[in-house]
Image (spheres, rainbow, N blue to C red):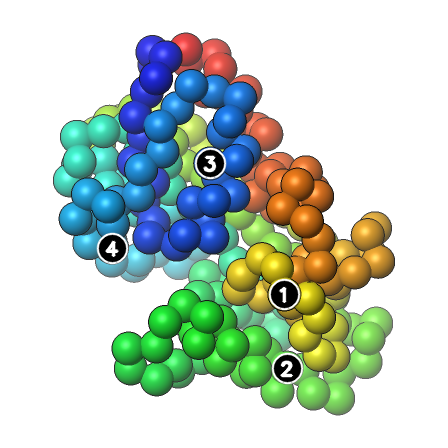
Amino acid sequence: MTMSTKIVLASGNEGKLRELQQLLRALDVELVTQKSLGIDDADETGLTFIENAILKARHASAASGLPALADDSGLAVDALSGAPGIYSARFADAPAGADRPARDAANNQKLLQLLDGTPESERTAHFHCVLVYLRHAADPTPVVCHGKWSGRILQAAAGEGGFGYDPLFYVPQMACSSAQLSAEQKNTISHRARAMQDLMQHLQSLL
């Protein structure tokens, strides 16, 4: 990989784009979303974060002709046997045409309902992030990096930052929710930050 490399991000999630752009600042990389290139979302038919990340990366790379970076991430709640897991983004039935904040709110409401009455000691949860980097669509050796962030689910939302389940995810080491962290704090300790730290080492070796 050469300097000033353009990489297509296999996502239209602006929250993920902001986080990944900030994490990639150390490299001379231009990250563009597949949405900005007119590329539709891939069919996520895998049963794991890894399978779906690879599917998304291959789809974006094939459609764009560029190296691709895909992120498949989600929340696994122990009391729910790992749910919502790979279905985190579409956990609840949001109204047709709902924007991302509305879908996030519906997902959070469903999670709270399912955990209603669950004691604090049993509300443990883990954010997972799998990042996949492909040099080209037929790359037989994709770079796969996994990050995990452990915490617990709050009884009610707290904080205005972040996205997704951040307002419900309590971070013990910081004594607040993920949504109450600054972007800089979150990008140091989150599941995505941990996966990206691993990916950065791989990308640096490919320069």
Tell me whether the residue at label 2 lies in contact with that at label 4, contact meaning CB atoms closer than 8 angstroms.
Answer: no
Q: Earlier in the sequence, mark 2 or mark 4?
A: 4
Image quarter (top left, top right, bottom left or bottom right) of the C terminus: top left
Indicate the secondary structure of the residue bearing disc 1: loop
Under mark 2, the amino acid is: Leu
Q: Is residue 56 above or below residue 80?
A: above
Q: Gap in Å between the C-alphas at discs 3 and 1?
A: 21 Å
Q: CA distance from mark 2 to mark 4?
A: 29 Å
Q: Quadrant of residue 76?
A: bottom right
- Label 2 and label 1: CA atoms lie apart by 17 Å
Q: Residue at x 75, y 88 (%)?
A: 117
Which image quarter holds the N terminus? top left
> Which amino acid is tagged 1?
Glu
Q: Secondary structure at mark 4?
A: loop
Q: Which residue is under mark 2?
A: 112
Decide: marks 2, 3 in contact (CB < 8 A)? no
- Among numbered discs 2 and 3, the one appearing first in the sequence: 3
- Specify which label sits upstream in the sequence, 1 or 4: 4
Q: Position of residue 126 (x, y in %)?
A: 65, 57
As rendered, which of 160 and 3 lies closer to the eye? 160
Q: Which residue is mark 1?
A: 160
Q: Give the structural element (helix, strand or loop) at label 3.
A: helix
The residue type indicated by label 3 comes to: Gln
Q: Residue at x 38, y 46 (%)?
A: 53
Res 59 seen here = no
**Disc number at residue 41?**
4
Q: Which residue is mark 3?
A: 21
Instruction: Check contact, mark 3 vs mark 1: CB within 8 A.
Output: no
